[in-house]
Image: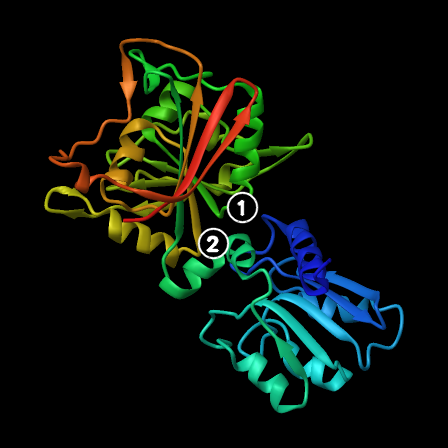
Amino acid sequence: MINVHEKYIKECFELALKAKGEVSPNPLVGSVIVKNGKVIAKGYHKGSGKDHAEIDAIKNATEDIKGATLYCNLEPCVHTNKKTPPCSQRLIKEGIKKVVISNLDPNPFVAGNGAKLLEENGIEVVTGILEQEGLELNEIFFHHITTKHPFIHIKLAQTLDGKMATSSGDSKWITNELSRDYVHKLRQSYDAIMVGKNTVINDDPKLTVRIDNNEKTIKRIVFAPNGIDTSFNLFNDQFKDQTFVASFEDNNYPNFIKLYTNNDQVDLDRFVQDLYGHGICSLFIEGGSFTASKFLEKRLFNKLSVFIAPKLIGNGINIGFADKKETMNESITFRDTKWKKFGDDMMFEAKRMN
């Protein structure tokens, strides 16, 4: 038997994903309005400052919504300190009879108050429908809104013998085209992508998001503590205004993020906090080995994706941690592990557990 609530919440998820890569720092939200067993409206949040999903659905209604049930994967907002008016008050005004939600909003300005206001005004509220799926959909939002810290996803590509590049630094291409296409879909969800100085020097990458023959960019960060020459693509293409350099010294870079030291090492905790101050709520780290290893060593990441290609190159560059593990109990462990196949390549993906 089909669970009706789950059916429509799944539809909310699908609607929400239409705005993937467009809503930061806001969550992905979709909404469906049902009356007498028939869908009479659908909507989704299309971007920061635009109508929330519930309001978008209301505006798209094909008939009077009084007495209808509204489905939404996130609790309707109740606060006024934002660009758009509160949704809960609008639902009360429109005469909605029931609201079905996947997740309560962790934003302290909402945090159950939207659901409470609806119930106080005679609207039945059902929560927790496909709650885990909802958490996964908005993992970036839930993390940054509760921690005030960017969600960090590290992506690695390696050979069967664990090499990220040849001994000369060449890494084009370890993985196949299917894997690389999927990486562009991963990039799409993040506010910024970051690589190390050596990756820029060796590969001269574009670091844009290319999907369905369309090219756009997110913020591009070059992690170069001791500076970098600005003759590379990132500093001279049509998206150059979105390129940032993280360095100790500002060498007249178009966009500069200052690095600081702590015990003679780059203070990565401060750097990441400064990124949040720049409005970067999520970061996709795409190598190279030095940059990725520093974040792995500090356990300064939330998710890891490792693409493994069926190749052997012998002597080369591996990820390599500087810190030494004496026992297996010291190892970094993961949860929610997934494996996905891209032609002959395999991808391992998981969230950091400890």
Determine the secondary structure under disc 2.
helix
Please state which amino acid type lies under the numbered disc 2: Ile
Task: Out of 47 and 344, give the one closest to the viewer.
Answer: 344
Residue occupying image coordinates x 59% and y 71%: 83
Please state which amino acid type lies under the numbered disc 1: Ser
Residue occupying image coordinates x 57% and y 80%: 114
Determine the secondary structure under disc 1.
loop
* Percent coordinates x, y for residue 345 in the rendering: 50, 21
Task: Out of 100 and 87, give the one closest to the viewer.
Answer: 100
Q: Which mark is residue 159?
A: none
Q: Is residue 193 above or below residue 345?
A: below
Residue occupying image coordinates x 37% and y 39%: 253
Q: Which mark is residue 189?
A: 1
Colouring: rainbow
Q: Is residue 97 above or below residue 175?
A: below
Res. 43 image quadrant: bottom right
Q: Mark 2 and 1 residues: CB-CB less than 8 Å, in contact?
A: yes
Of pointers 2 and 1, the one earlier in the residue sequence: 2
- Mark 2, residue position: 140
Q: Is residue 79 visible?
A: no
